[in-house]
Amino acid sequence: MRSKLSTVASNDAYEQKAVIQRPPLIDSQRPIAVARNELLNCVANHSS
């Protein structure tokens, strides 16, 4: 049982480290927003 608890504890520590190392959601979403803006600009240019 002790080994199972230590495994859970190490998993929690790994999860916390992964969360810290993971880039913020805003940064990962930024390229999508830029591409969407470019697409909207392209559509606006073609429609005019």
Image (spheres, grey):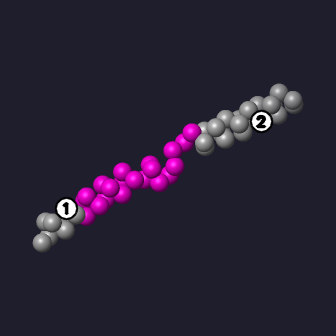
Most extreme residue toward the bottom is 48
Q: Quadrant of residue 40?
A: bottom left
Residue named by callout 2:
9
Residue named by callout 1:
42
- Category of crowding for the residue at label 1, using alpha-carbon neighbours closer than 10 angstroms: few (below 14), some (14–19), many (at least 20): few
Mark 2 lies on a secondary structure that is: helix
Q: Residue at x 12, y 72 (%)?
A: 48
30 is within the stretch colored magenta: yes
Most extreme residue toward the right is 1
- Residue type of the residue flagged with mark 2: Ala
Mark 1 lies on a secondary structure that is: helix
- Category of crowding for the residue at label 2, using alpha-carbon neighbours closer than 10 angstroms: few (below 14), some (14–19), many (at least 20): few
- Residue type of the residue flagged with mark 1: Cys
Q: Which percent across, then down, holds residue 33?
A: 36, 57
Real-space Cα separation, disc 2 to disc 1, in angstroms: 51 Å
Q: Is residue 1 above or below residue 42?
A: above
32 lies left or right of 46: right
2 is within the stretch colored magenta: no
Which span of residues is magenta-colored?
A: 21-40
Q: Is residue 22 above or below residue 6?
A: below
